[in-house]
C-alpha cells in the first residue's frame, strides 16, 4: 500500500494530546464611578487700557503705497507674458488670473488695479516669480516748465 491511500498516521509522529477544556468566561469588568464635574472655565479677564494702534496689521509704506512683496508696490505696471491662463481650470487661482486677462484687454494696468479686482498679493508675487507676468516701475509724471 502507498502512503497516500493509507489513512493511518505515520509511525514517526507522536499522538496528539487531548484538547484542554475552555476556561470559564470572565465576569464583566466593574464600571468606574463617574468623574466629578469639572469647574466651569472662567472667561478671560477684561483688558484694561488702550489696544495697540495697529493690532498687528501691516502699516502702509510712504506716500500711501502698500508693499506687496520684495520690490513690488501698487504703482507698478503689469505686463502679461502669456495670454493663456497657466492655472488649473476650476481653481481659485484660475479665476483670479482671469482678472489679469480682463484688465489687459482694457490697456495698461497696475498692481493696485489687480488688488481692487480681488487678486491676492501672494498671486502677484507668485506670478512674477514664475514668469507669468512682468512688473516695471510706472513712468514718473514730467513736470511742465
Image: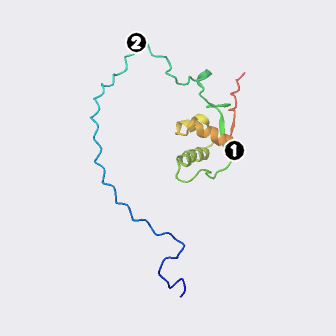
Q: x%, y% of residue 76? A: 65, 33
**Left or right of 140, for residue 27:** left
Q: Secondary structure at mark 2?
A: loop
Q: Residue at x 68, y 27 (%)?
A: 141
- The residue labelled by disc 1 is 131
What number is the disc on residue 48?
A: 2
Residue 116 position (above or below residue 51): below
Q: x%, y% of residue 72? A: 65, 32
Q: Residue at x 33, y 55 (%)?
A: 23
Distance between the alpha carbons at the discs numbered 2 and 1? 50 Å
Residue 88 position (above or below residue 72): below
> In the rendered image, which quarter is residue 104 located in?
top right
Foreground mark, 2 or 1, reads 2
Q: Secondary structure at mark 1?
A: loop
Instruction: Please tell me which residue lies in front, 20 or 76.
Output: 20
What number is the disc on residue 57?
A: none
Taking the view exactly as shown, the residue that stands out farthest to the right is: 145
Taking the view exactly as shown, the residue that stands out farthest to the bottom is: 1
Instruction: Please tell me which residue lies in front, 58 or 60.
Output: 58
Amino acid at each position: 500500500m502507498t502512503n497516500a491511500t493509507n489513512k493511518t498516521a505515520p509511525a514517526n509522529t507522536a499522538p496528539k494530546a487531548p484538547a484542554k477544556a475552555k476556561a470559564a468566561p470572565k465576569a464583566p469588568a466593574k464600571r468606574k464611578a463617574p468623574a466629578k464635574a469639572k469647574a466651569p472655565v472662567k472667561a478671560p479677564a477684561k483688558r484694561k487700557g488702550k489696544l495697540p494702534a495697529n493690532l498687528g496689521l501691516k502699516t502702509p509704506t510712504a506716500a500711501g503705497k502698500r508693499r506687496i512683496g520684495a520690490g513690488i508696490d501698487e504703482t507698478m505696471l503689469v505686463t502679461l507674458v502669456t495670454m493663456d491662463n497657466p492655472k488649473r481650470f476650476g481653481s481659485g487661482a484660475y479665476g483670479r488670473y482671469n482678472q489679469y486677462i480682463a484688465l489687459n484687454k482694457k490697456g495698461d494696468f497696475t498692481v493696485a488695479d489687480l488688488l481692487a479686482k480681488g487678486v491676492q498679493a501672494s498671486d502677484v508675487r507668485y506670478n512674477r516669480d514664475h514668469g507669468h507676468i512682468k512688473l516695471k516701475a510706472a513712468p514718473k509724471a514730467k513736470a511742465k516748465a
